[in-house]
Image (cartoon, rainbow, N blue to C red):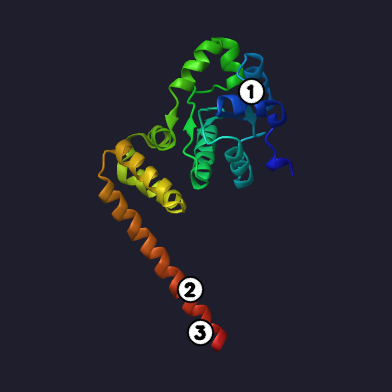
Amino acid sequence: KKSNILYGLNKTKQYIKEKDSIIVVEGPTDLIRLYQNNVKNVVAIGGTAFNEIQARALKYESKNIYINLDSDEKFQGQKAASRAGYILFKNGIEPKIISLPLNSDPDDFIKEKGIDIYLEYINKSKKLIEFDYEIYKSINKENANPQGFVDKIKDEIISINNLIYREIAIQNLSKVINVSIESIQSSIQDLINKKNKWKKNKKNETAINQKS
């Protein structure tokens, strides 16, 4: 299935193994530009959609993942990078995001600025939750606040079943919004309890309906 393909992996697999890291880009032109500039530990996902199958395939190759999707004024590419990041987090990988300037993609950026400047951006890559908070603030401007961001990503954190990686996400969130880990954990636990209560009520309703 086309949506499950990681473009270029057959050619770049050996370089990924050598570097023990992967740069994930949007399209084949980005991949080719990087490859031609001797950055060969790269794959393309063929668009902004990213799924569990691709996440597991990446994890098989390396656990050091850098996401570099296109950035745009409507923040669609940035949101897609965050979505991909959370899918990776749920699969036991804490990714980093390469945050190029607005309206940039790796292909055009390297053509204009050169590979050395691009490599600097790799070194300045951000943890997922730090990046996502910056995007949240850019979109919401004066309406942005720590509680709003927690509300936005609570479901993402809850869906991280691996408790170690969930703890890492909570620690990162605490640093980013400057709120105690305990307060965040309490907020997360409240939501888990509500979800469990809803599931229990739903199960009871189903059982009653089946009896009647």
Residue 208 is labelled as 3
The kind of residue tagged 2 is Lys
| The label number, if any, that marks residue 201 in the structure image | none
**Of 155 and 172, which appears nearest the observer?**
172
Q: Tell me if mark 2 has few (under 14), some (14-19) or many (20+) residues whose alpha carbon lies within 10 angstroms of its own.
A: few
- Disc count in the image? 3
* Residue under label 1: 30
**Whether residue 101 is visible:** no
Helix, strand or loop at disc 1? helix
The x and y percentages for residue 45 are 65, 34
Crowdedness of circle 1 by 10 Å Cα count: few (<14), some, many (20+)?
many
Q: Is residue 172 above or below residue 23?
A: below
The CA distance from mark 2 to mark 3 is: 10 Å
Judged from the image, the secondary structure of the residue bearing numbered disc 3 is helix
Who comes first in sequence, dot 1 or dot 3? 1
Q: Is residue 40 above or below residue 4?
A: above
